[in-house]
Amino acid sequence: MNDAQAKQTISLLIVGADIATFDDNDTLVRQGAIAIDGDTIVWIGTAAEARDKFDAAETLRASGMIAMPGFIDCHVHTAQQFLHGKLPSVRRKGELRSPMWQRYLIPFESGLEPEDVYASGIAAYSAMIRSGTTCFLEAGGPFPDEMGRAAGDIGIRGRIAMSTMDTTDDLPAHSRMDTADALRRSEELVVRWKDHPRVNAWLSLRQLMVNTEPLRLGMRDLSHALDTPIHTHLAEGTYEVDFAIRNWSMRSAEYLEKTGCLDHHVHAAHSVLLSLNELDLYAARDVSACHCSLNNYTMGRPRLLEMMRRNIRVGLGTDGAATRASLDMFQVMHGAVLGQQAVNGTPYHCDPPVTHEQMLKQAFRGGARAARLEQHIGQLAVGMKADIVLVATDDLDQFPNYDPIITLAESAVGRDVRDVVIDGRIVMKDRELLTLDLEPMRERVRHQYKTIMSRFDLAIGDPGDAA
Ligand SMILES: [Zn+2]
């Protein structure tokens, strides 16, 4: 290029990293550069080529690091963040009751105030960013606008949702909604958030056992009218299959199919206890699923590999911090590989059923499909949104970094994430969050935590730390 040729003006240049694109050809660019303008990736090539090509407002030097797409956590409970570590302590006392979501998680959520949910959001979304997650799908919880406000302040991409429960029995009065009210508030939520550049709202049905048929049918109609997905829990426990058989003489997904509620708008977390017939229904109706490996293997034999092979839209998710206390998607990915190896076996003289690299790609590309965002995220390519994670490779644990993709897939964990760009904006640099001062929030959280937990102890009849 000669001096007469003008350099292209861009907003951000990431330069020097090995770029693991996870595109259709698994392109790897060593010592590469990514040019970003606004929220979009406009060019990917080598650092040497980029030198004379761009005039960048900001440059992020990333030599020795690996650039990868951001993780998409396809099933998280923002509002349960402060339950982190509590349930294992109840289990240790030998007092854990089942099903856990009904006995503990819903009573916990019913004791939260809006400001608690905002603080949960700040804690959860900052933990996500610090382990490489740039997009989340909220399962549905209380005060979703507070989740949205926290996501907006932190700078993460996400889909918030409001939990809906309208059965009359076995629910804290606080959590129970009138059916028409649940539908009206869900619709208003989706409409209220439809124009935000990063945070929109989905619909949510909590669980078959706490939703009535009129709510399910109403939610189906709403999902069509608003062209918006419904996040739900499905095939997640033997109790749910028993419930479905007792009430409708068929399994959960079969019942949804019969009532016309199983379609491409349904996003079904867990999806563990599926019969082969139900798996066919997922494929035929284009239902998406989320595999939460840190929890799913306690529920049954998850059919993740079969879903992947049938091209069902399936992403990976943490299920929030309450039950397994980690929002690190690297851990979820490792758990999924080992879990599938265990349930599918490794026959003599055969390759393992799924490799870490395949599972990592599933987390990105499958996650983007499950989020209905495959046109925008899940790979590093020109035209995609700039959601980019830079992973350090200078820990001895990763030495030698022979192949960046293998390093990512087999050695990296959340704490190796150094810098994070979301929607073209640097939100974390050198592990320091740039969008929000977390210190005042830490203080507020410490203060609120005691109140939240004493309400919870009261709700579940546990004397708590006072005992
Ligand atoms: Zn869940």
Image (spheres, rainbow, N blue to C red):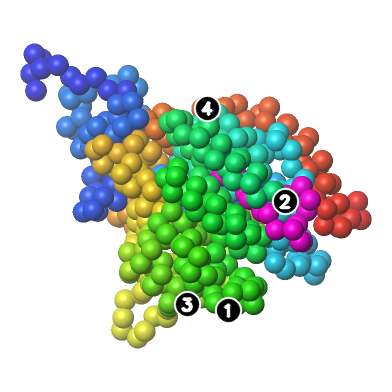
The quadrant holding residue 153 is top right
Is residue 329 at all visible to an observer of this figure?
no
Question: Could you tell me the amino acid type at mark 3?
Answer: Ser
Pick whichever, 244 or 385, lies toward us. 244
Left or right of 355: which side holds 180?
right
Read off the residue under disc 2. Answer: 176
Point out residue 13 in the picture as x, y percentages from the top left corner: 30, 28
Given the image, on which type of amino acid does mark 4 rest? Thr
In the picture of the structure, the residue carrying the numbered disc 1 is 249
Magenta stretch encompasses residue 122: no
C-beta proximity under 8 Å, tags 1 and 3: no
Residue corresponding to mark 3: 275
**Image spot of residue 279 (x, y percent):** 42, 72
* Gap in angstroms between the C-alphas marked 4 and 1: 52 Å
Q: Which amino acid does label 2 sit on?
A: Arg
Question: Which circle, 3 or 2, is nearer the viewer?
Answer: 2
The answer to whether mark 4 and mark 3 are in CB contact below 8 A is: no
Q: How crowded is mark 4: few (under 14 residues within 10 Å), some or many (20 or more)?
A: some
CA separation in Å, label 2 and label 1: 26 Å
State how far apart marks 2 and 4 are (Cα): 36 Å
Residue 454 lies, in percent from the top left, at: 84, 46
Which label's residue is closer to the chain start, 4 or 1? 1
Q: In this view, does 67 lie to the left or right of 442?
A: left
Please report the residue visible at 46 percent of the width from the left and 67 percent of the height from the top: 257
Measure the alpha-carbon separation of dots 3 and 2.
31 Å
